[in-house]
Amino acid sequence: MTNHLKSRLSAAAFASAVFAAGAGGTALPSLAAVDCGEAPAAPAHHLLPANADTVHWGYFAKGREPVVAAHSGDFVTIETLTHHANDDAERMVKGDPGAESVFKWEPGDKGVDRRGAGPMDASALGRGAGEGFGVHVLTGPVYVCGAEPGDVLEVKILDLAPRPSANPDYAGKTFGSNAAAWWGFHYNDLIEEPKPREVITIYELDATGGKDWAKAVYSYRWVPQTDPDGVVHEIIDYPGVPVDHSTVTETPALEGIRVPIRPHFGTMGVAPAEADFVDSIPPGYFGGNIDNWRIGKGGTMYYPVAVEGALLSAGDPHAAQGDSELAGTAIETSMTGVVQVILHKKDELAGTPLEELDYPLLETDSEWVVHGFSYANYLDELGDTAQSDIYSKSSIDNAMRDAFRKMRHFLMTTKGLSEDEAISLMSVATDFGVTQVVDGNWGVHGVIEKRVFAD
Amino acid sequence: MTNHLKSRLSAAAFASAVFAAGAGGTALPSLAAVDCGEAPAAPAHHLLPANADTVHWGYFAKGREPVVAAHSGDFVTIETLTHHANDDAERMVKGDPGAESVFKWEPGDKGVDRRGAGPMDASALGRGAGEGFGVHVLTGPVYVCGAEPGDVLEVKILDLAPRPSANPDYAGKTFGSNAAAWWGFHYNDLIEEPKPREVITIYELDATGGKDWAKAVYSYRWVPQTDPDGVVHEIIDYPGVPVDHSTVTETPALEGIRVPIRPHFGTMGVAPAEADFVDSIPPGYFGGNIDNWRIGKGGTMYYPVAVEGALLSAGDPHAAQGDSELAGTAIETSMTGVVQVILHKKDELAGTPLEELDYPLLETDSEWVVHGFSYANYLDELGDTAQSDIYSKSSIDNAMRDAFRKMRHFLMTTKGLSEDEAISLMSVATDFGVTQVVDGNWGVHGVIEKRVFAD
């Protein structure tokens, strides 16, 4: 979002727009009504479908009414939808009641009106309600009973499977969209004409899981799209704009190329405390749009809880992504996950591996992964204009610094090493990689193998 | 080397020192004497031991007299020595004739006097001959018969094995040193006292290859060391200074920790054309000190040839390193490699995967890896003061930009994709990682799996 946002909206304008919206006429319902009842004798399994009533689009909000209440130990089957489904509605929306309810858009009538943390009246840029300051369809939030600020929420990802196309023409297949967009790292550094340009590539994967790779179906270059409310989108500046395929040219792409699949949640996290509406794009201490392909089946995330009930949401499902997410998106693909939520109370953290955890930590079968960002907590560090300023402060160098500090903390606190030991081990056995360079608050992850600690 | 060099030596002083040395009284021998003779009917296998006559220390030099001449297809067994062996000479030098000849240092008499690309009279900083502007012991150069600028040199790494300790007290073991040094990313960002500090950790590995992990033996904090010529080294500012172990405190370190071994050449490359003496620390188009742990057994490097004979050298052997080489070094461990050199003539490159190759490219069994740097060719881009300026221009952000461009080039030229295809594939299937943040010209590598192209 960097370039256009910078040139078209001042920091102050964005901040006032966002905060006015948060404080204004669209006040959120109170959480007081959440009734957790007694914890059941055995863990419950909640089913959380994705539809217009169960998703919030483009933002985290500490005041958002929960769609389910879960006790520690409960399981949740959580459907998630890609916000890019309308890049090819025939393959990714048609016939799917949940997706149709979310993506419904008739003149003056959207299934989900607010898309982003911006003003509802689109007074900042005129794109649409919420202004697309934040783009991800997020399912939730899940209220975790008993969760309070200072606790740690553990989320085990037990399964994550592609959502089959509901269009009978494409039975047994799942589709995803990759947008090489204006917020991509490549956008102002192209060599072929026309420059610049945005390109959508539609990928297909095996919905049954029988093949571990995806292939491109076709691609098209974005041309201005007029949404049902008459707003013309010259670029991909608002999520869920239906693409009229009579206006684009579908071109064969990447023939013979197999993309290894890496199903994961691009975005999953708890609600931040610092603002009422938080743009879903920049990740932070609360997790959010980390865009690390390792956050998939078999992975466990640990998040510091910032608000009552934690308010866990997930979305932005990806079938595959490379470290850096170079062009701005992954293979954006609707998927359904099964997670288990486990609450660790703050007064029980001392002496455990989760002591002092103030960042989103990933555990996989074989690795520990810390997540560094240009700013560890940009909402706090950048003040009132954080949500716009972050886009002009993107830096891998800073994210590397943050990842170094977090891995040092992990090794010293969680693994009990001295600083000298931690630093030597980081130099000889920790891999730092570029998580993403497209989400404003750029990311570097640090990975250390568990077998290092086998003794 | 960033901080101290910046504060203690102006760019102009460094440039004049280096170039004076190159042009002055220590003129290098001519290459005219190289006699390749007729190419043999079958590939030859050359044995290249490491000793004071076969290594150059701390620099690449296009005028350096070759120690062996190889035809395309020949094999070379090449011994390489770590420049950190004197961190524990008992374990890494004693009893080893090659290492003893290189590390010999009596008052006024060094086995290898020049250590670095700086002035021989140490008039810049007073550290010693060559000033330690460049630190790696490099074996070679190998003159590749028929190689000319514009060609591509392929180097297959067929084997790479640790060099056993020659001290009978340590039979069957190999040792390495990890220095958390002043040029490390962590150095000005420490939390424990005393700050700052340098720490050496000595690691042990199984010389027989029976174990795939190394363990720490002990560590010590650096204290000022007086070299045999009477120069006091307050910090690790000159390579090969013998550490007097009566002055340091050996402390147990990293008990129970196993570091997976990843044997590789930290430094391997061809001689650059831009300057007579080139500091061995910053990597560039010619390869050099890339510090990518993937450049190990089974790997093949492709280098653009810049000078007649290519002049391939290798050194800086590492038993293990993490992506970023955070604290400044790996497990620096003497090793012996077996390589095959294959010359690709410039007039035969068109239409091949090596067409237009102007960067160091790695091929492994399963991956293709491009190497981006803060500056693709810092020697050319930064002009006469490049060799000092590069240390103040380190940037992961720039290296990511360079890695993106090189991966795009690889996918478009070597794999024949359109730019749109290449960019989508980079976003969904290419991993960018932080190679190193300690070599002045910082690195980001881009990795794509070969199975992507299986069809």
Image (cartoon, coloured by chain):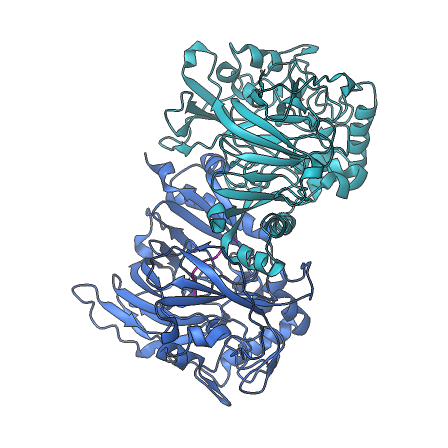
Chain colours: A cyan, B blue
Residue furthest front as drawn: A41
Q: Is residue B251 visible?
A: yes
Q: Quadrant of residue A443?
A: top right
Q: State yes or no: residue B318 in magenta.
A: yes
Residue ID at (51%, 58%)? B255
Locate residue A364, reporting x and y percent: 50, 38
Q: Is residue B313 visible?
A: no
Residue ID at (38%, 37%)? B452
Residue ID at (71%, 38%)? A347
Q: Which residues are magenta?
A: B317-323
Locate residue A316, reporting x and y percent: 58, 27
Closer-to-camera residue (B20/B431): B431
Residue furthest left as drawn: B41
Locate residue A21, reporting x and y percent: 80, 24
Closer-to-camera residue (A186/A98): A98
Closer-to-camera residue (B4/A274): A274
Q: Quadrant of residue B244?
A: bottom right
Q: Considering only vertical position in the picture, is A246 above or below B309?
A: above
Closer-to-camera residue (A358/A393): A358
Q: Considering only vertical position in the picture, is A117 above or below A167?
A: below
Query: Is B298 on the left-hand or right-hand side of A7?
Result: left
Quadrant containing the N terminus of chain A is top right
Locate residue B280, reporting x and y percent: 49, 68
Q: How many marks?
A: 0
Query: Is B26 on the left-hand or right-hand side of A434?
Result: left
Q: Main secondary structure of the magenta part?
A: loop
Query: Is A303 on the left-hand or right-hand side of A173?
Result: right
Q: State yes or no: residue B44 in magenta.
A: no
